[in-house]
Amino acid sequence: MKVTVVGAGSVGASCAEYIAIKDFASEVVLLDIKEGYAEGKAMDLMQTASLNGFDTKITGVTGDYSKTADTDVAVITSGIPRKPGMTREELIGINAGIVKDVSDNLIKHSPNVIIIVVSNPMDTMTYLVHKTTGLAKNKIIGMGGALDSARFKYRLAEALEAPISDVDGMVIGGHSDTGMIPLTRLATRNSLPVHKILSEERLTQVSEETKVGGATLTKLLGTSAWYAPGAAVSGLVQAIACDQKKMFPCSALLEGEYGMSDISIGVPVILGKNGIESIVEIELTEAEKAKMEESAAGVRKTNGLLEL
Ligand SMILES: NC(=O)c1ccc[n+]([C@@H]2O[C@H](COP(=O)([O-])OP(=O)(O)OC[C@H]3O[C@@H](n4cnc5c(N)ncnc54)[C@H](O)[C@@H]3O)[C@@H](O)[C@H]2O)c1
Ligand SMILES: O=C(O)C[C@H](O)C(=O)O
């Protein structure tokens, strides 16, 4: 299994590190445009191999896509992150050109590649890859919901004063400060619905904290987060590499599912060796459907800014 990670910045390097530590891939290629940067990150990571006990071979390369040939799964993290006070949508002007260029180059050298899009605004960048490459829809996956769900579980555990391993929950919808939909109705602590344990007011607080999870960290760090994003990406790559058929909320191109078409937005999918094996349709309440429509309207507005 060969994995390429484009962008050797904070998220790209974190993702390469988690993939290596989980030790399921034979090879990870890190690619960046900054001269020597990916090579340096790869060497530093390789010097953790004997300490962390992995055999994955990590190499770094500056802009040379021939080194990515025959990649099975590629992760696109190249582009700029937001600064405090910005929205993810404001990054579209710079990141759209980068994501288009990178996906074209990846496919040139690996026509059968499965692409995981991370760069923001992620749902729109995922839609862009659908619109501008000839890749099958199951091979283009946007990462957002896996991270948002991890943040939801973190906030739920905090509210419940419970260990995170007791908690389950999922976030669907667009990966934006206003578009995320934490499914509080379905969240559980060891099978017990959390809405039976927590007050409505506390659950609303959990939802709101989840939705601004990325913005909260951006304010604290001065740039956006990388550990949980890297870990979330590594989970998706592992599910594909090991054909796990695991369920994650991911940005997927909808063709009628959830009553929507021609949009890529966060819904539960099954990930396996073919990428998106299937889209899972949850029966939503009228209120949840309305939130999903509103979230989709936000994503469509950003998609409208693309020059297609
Ligand atoms: N989807 C998510 O859940 C999620 C989570 C975290 C970050 N992000 C996004 O991921 C992106 C990267 O974030 P980061 O914190 O790693 O930023 P970063 O600035 O640390 O790293 C970005 C890297 O991309 C490289 N790059 C720029 N243009 C390139 C090109 N054309 N080809 C190859 N490399 C190129 C830069 O040199 C830099 O090293 C941002 O857009 C951020 O918003 C998304
Ligand atoms: O918040 C951001 O801009 C980065 C990422 O989308 C995140 O949720 O951490």
Image: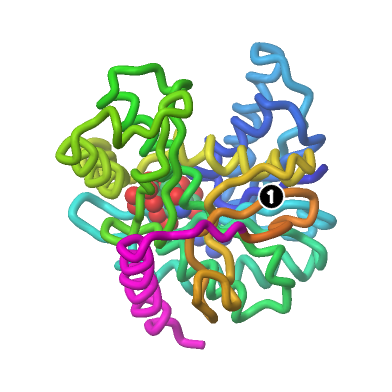
Q: In the image, what residue occupies the spot 39% across and 57% down? A: 175
Residue on which the image places disc 1: 271
Answer with the quarter of the image where residue 8 lies. top right
The image shows residue 110 at horizontal and vertical percentages of: 80, 63
Q: In the image, what residue occupies the spot 74% across and 72% down? A: 136
Residue range in magenta is: 280-308
Q: Is residue 33 visible?
A: no
- Position of 105 with respect to 118 (left or right) is right
Q: Amino acid at mark 1?
A: Leu
Q: In the image, what residue occupies the spot 35% across and 54% down? A: 181
Q: Is residue 166 above or below residue 196?
A: above
Q: Is residue 263 visible?
A: yes
Given residues 66 and 2, the one toward you in this image is 2
The image shows residue 202 at horizontal and vertical percentages of: 18, 35
Q: What secondary structure characterizes most of the magenta part? A: helix
Q: Is residue 241 above or below residue 306?
A: above
- Position of 232 with respect to 160 (left or right) is right
Magenta-colored stretch includes residue 299: yes
Q: In the image, what residue occupies the spot 60% across and 80% down? A: 131
